Image (spheres, rainbow, N blue to C red):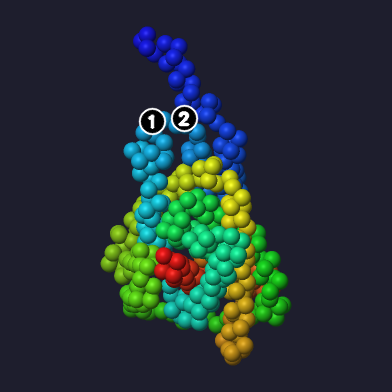
């Protein structure tokens, strides 16, 4: 009892509090974390991602005295560090892809294979962003992490960054999740600018009905093809197609429901708070972070434009009854379903009975495959 009330003990306790160690950088990061939570709660922008990330930012930027307390995120013996290793070692992303596969219907690209080309070609904008990152002074490993941000596919961006430059994981992840918010703010203006009035009202043929057998064979052939072409992407492709196979067979319904439900929810929470942990103020609040954010926005815009232009180019060789509405080109951004809903919204502005959502899901899921494919190529070339 005397030890507890000893003046030196009290002084030591005070030195270990946040108030004794806080800096302006910590305050800025805490404000950013609170902003993420407010966006999620008030504006309902991607709440399942932004709330865990925002709360993780708060936890990750509570300053500690530089002594071993076995509770800090970057101490190997701490519980939080165990969660954080899920990002640095790339554990979370493959499980996220397992859940995405169990929630994704690939019939839209099986019924209209041309849409696969749109999703993949538009992802070549990643290489343009990669080159721009090199020009402004980033090394190849950093440029590879930055280039992938623009597809708004945060799990893939986190996975690639953890393999190429773990120090950028926090900045890359925050940027990638921020662009999910930008989808409804930027894409409609780009779509209106790069399409003519005639193109905006193109009506596409109803997609054919895909058989159950085709749906089962697609993930099997998909993993074999992508695995042979880009073996470094197997942790993502393999889990994506496994999740889809669990969904489509109808004999593993219980596994499919667990994967896309409880398991997915748990990993999203752990991934979100771990992303927040990685935003240590000394690494996040730098000039490079601002450069990364700007390059990511450029990448986002470039990929959106390339998706639209790819369709316009394809239409030059298609009969009038087979033409594709360029408004679905924005959906090749692989922030799954969000960008497809923007295609539907803008399309209805010009023709209130032209429903593009089912067509837009084609380049949307193709963009998911394409971004993962390009990410694997980048990983192989750089590593």
- Mark yes or no: residue 311 visible: yes
Please name the residue that numbered disc 1 is placed on: 69
Residue 135, x across and y down, in percent: 60, 65
Q: Is residue 363 visible?
A: no
Q: Are marks 1 and 2 in contact (CB under 8 Å)?
A: yes
Vertical comparison of 228 with 183: above or below: below
Question: Which residue occupies 63% across, 72% down?
Answer: 305
- Judge by depth and name the residue closer to the eye, 45 or 375: 375
Instruction: Name the residue at the left extreme.
Output: 251
Residue at position x 61%, y 69% from top?
Answer: 302
Residue of label 2: 65
65 vs 19, nearest the viewer:
65
For disc 1, the neighbor class at 10 Å (few under 14, some 14 to 19, many from 20) is: few
Neighbourhood count class around disc 2 (C-alpha, 10 Å): few under 14, some 14–19, many 20 upward = some
164 and 83: which one is in front?
A: 164
Separation of residues labelled 1 and 2 (CA atoms): 9 Å
Q: Is residue 64 left or right of residue 263?
A: right
Where residue 72 sits: x, y (%)?
41, 36
């Amino acid at each position: 009892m005397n030890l507890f009330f000893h003046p030196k003990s009290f002084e030591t306790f005070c030195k270990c509090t946040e108030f004794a160690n806080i800096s302006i950088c910590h305050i800025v990061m805490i404000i950013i974390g609170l902003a993420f939570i407010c966006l999620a709660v008030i504006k309902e922008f991607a709440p399942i991602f932004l709330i865990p990330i925002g709360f993780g930012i708060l936890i990750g930027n509570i300053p500690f005295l530089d002594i071993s307390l076995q509770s800090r995120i970057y101490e190997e013996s701490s519980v939080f560090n165990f969660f954080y290793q899920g990002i640095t070692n790339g554990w979370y992303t493959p499980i996220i892809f397992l859940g995405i596969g169990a929630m994704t219907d690939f019939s839209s690209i099986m019924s209209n294979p041309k849409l696969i080309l749109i999703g993949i070609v538009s992802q070549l904008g990643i290489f343009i962003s990669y080159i721009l990152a090199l020009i402004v002074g980033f090394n190849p490993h950093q440029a590879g992490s930055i280039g992938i941000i623009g597809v708004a596919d945060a799990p893939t961006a986190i996975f690639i960054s953890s393999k190429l430059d773990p120090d950028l994981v926090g900045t890359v992840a925050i940027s990638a999740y921020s662009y999910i918010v930008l989808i409804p703010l930027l894409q409609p203006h780009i779509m209106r600018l790069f399409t003519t009035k005639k193109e905006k009202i193109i009506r596409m043929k109803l997609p054919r009905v895909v058989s159950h057998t085709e749906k089962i064979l697609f993930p099997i052939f998909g993993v074999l093809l992508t695995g042979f072409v880009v073996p470094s992407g197997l942790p993502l492709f393999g889990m994506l197609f496994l999740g889809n196979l669990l969904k489509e067979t109808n004999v593993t319904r219980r596994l499919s429901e667990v994967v896309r439900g409880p398991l997915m929810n748990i990993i999203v929470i752990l991934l979100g708070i771990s992303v927040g942990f990685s935003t240590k103020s000394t690494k996040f609040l730098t000039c490079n972070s601002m450069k990364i954010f700007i390059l990511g926005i450029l990448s986002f815009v470039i990929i959106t434009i390339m998706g639209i232009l790819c369709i316009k180019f394809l239409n030059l060789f298609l009969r009038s009854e087979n033409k594709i509405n360029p408004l679905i080109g924005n959906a090749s951004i692989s922030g799954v379903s969000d960008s497809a809903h923007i295609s539907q919204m803008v399309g209805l502005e010009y023709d209130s009975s032209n429903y593009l959502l089912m067509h837009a899901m084609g380049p949307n899921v193709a963009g998911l495959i394409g971004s993962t494919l390009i990410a694997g190529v980048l990983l192989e070339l750089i590593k």
